[in-house]
Amino acid sequence: MRGFFISFEGTEGSGKTSVIKAVVAHFESKGIRVLTSREPGGIRISEKIRDILLDKDHTEMDARTEALLFAASRRQHLVEKIRPALEEGKMVLCDRFVDSSLVYQGVARNLGIEEVYQINQFAIEDTLPDLTIFVDVRPEVGLARVFSTSGREVNRLDLEQLEFHQKIYNGYLKLIEMFPNRIQKIDGECPIEDVIAQAITLIESRL
Ligand code: TMP
């Protein structure tokens, strides 16, 4: 029996990481075996690639290098962690997956959704999430949250201008049009309990 693969997407400060934690607790309390992970990272080699990607000093990083490193990190994560968990029948909740590359590198870095999809296809070989939850928070609201939350690490990509984040947000809206069945939007600007409830309802409707 194959498990169920869910990815969470959103702009910076969308709150998806807190939503994932609550969703995991909900399904584990029902006796469902859940694996959580994140991208870039989730496994030793991929966490090392994450360090290279998010290092604030790496200002000279070329956009294609960035796209290839995200895809490389994804490949290792997929074969070492996600696929084995799915084969064991687990529910896999992943904080970001291929759609992040399609919008951050494809749209915001102007590499093109199709081009970035192709290099990712080499990495994922058709393993796409069964469901992708887009936590919808407008970029100005998300960024305000990021910079007002003390203790939240500000990474290299956070420092890009609001315009960049607006492009990402628009990129997600475009992906929702391209994959209307797989990618579902929830309202991330309402109180956190409501955001969590929307995510749980959506997942339960697909199980
Ligand atoms: P996060 O762990 O705070 O979500 O940060 C990861 C950053 O990396 C975030 O700015 C989004 C970015 N990212 C990409 O640009 N492409 C990708 O494929 C992934 C997974 C993340």
Image (cartoon, rainbow, N blue to C red):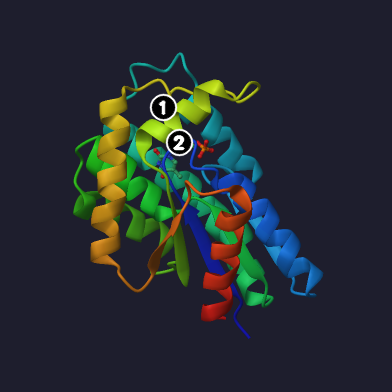
- Residue that numbered label 1 is attached to: 157
Q: CA distance from mark 1 to mark 2?
A: 9 Å
Mark closest to the chain's N terminus, 1 or 2: 2
- Nearer to me, 165 or 72: 165
As drawn, 163 above or below 206: above
Looking at the image, which residue is at 58% across and 77% down?
204
Q: Nearer the viewer, mark 1 or mark 2?
A: 2
- Residue that numbered label 2 is attached to: 12
**Could you tell me the amino acid type at mark 2?**
Glu
Q: Secondary structure at mark 1?
A: loop
Asked if the residue under mark 2 is in contact with the one under mark 1, i.e. CB atoms within 8 Å, the reply is: yes
Cβ of mark 1 under 8 Å from ligand 1: the answer is yes
Q: Quadrant of the N terminus?
A: bottom right
Q: Position of residue 8 (x, y in %)?
A: 50, 55
Q: Is residue 154 visible?
A: no
Q: Is residue 114 left or right of residue 138?
A: left
As drawn, 70 above or below 159: below
Q: Is residue 86 left or right of residue 163?
A: right
Looking at the image, which residue is at 63% across and 46% down?
18
Q: Residue furthest bottom?
A: 1
| Residue 201 location, quadrant | bottom right
Looking at the image, which residue is at 19% across and 46% down?
112
The quarter of the picture showing ligand 1: top left
Cβ of mark 2 under 8 Å from ligand 1: the answer is yes
Q: Position of residue 59 (x, y in %)?
A: 37, 16
**Could you tell me the amino acid type at mark 1?**
Leu
Q: Secondary structure at mark 2?
A: loop
Q: Quadrant of the C terminus?
A: bottom right
Q: Which mark is residue 50?
A: none
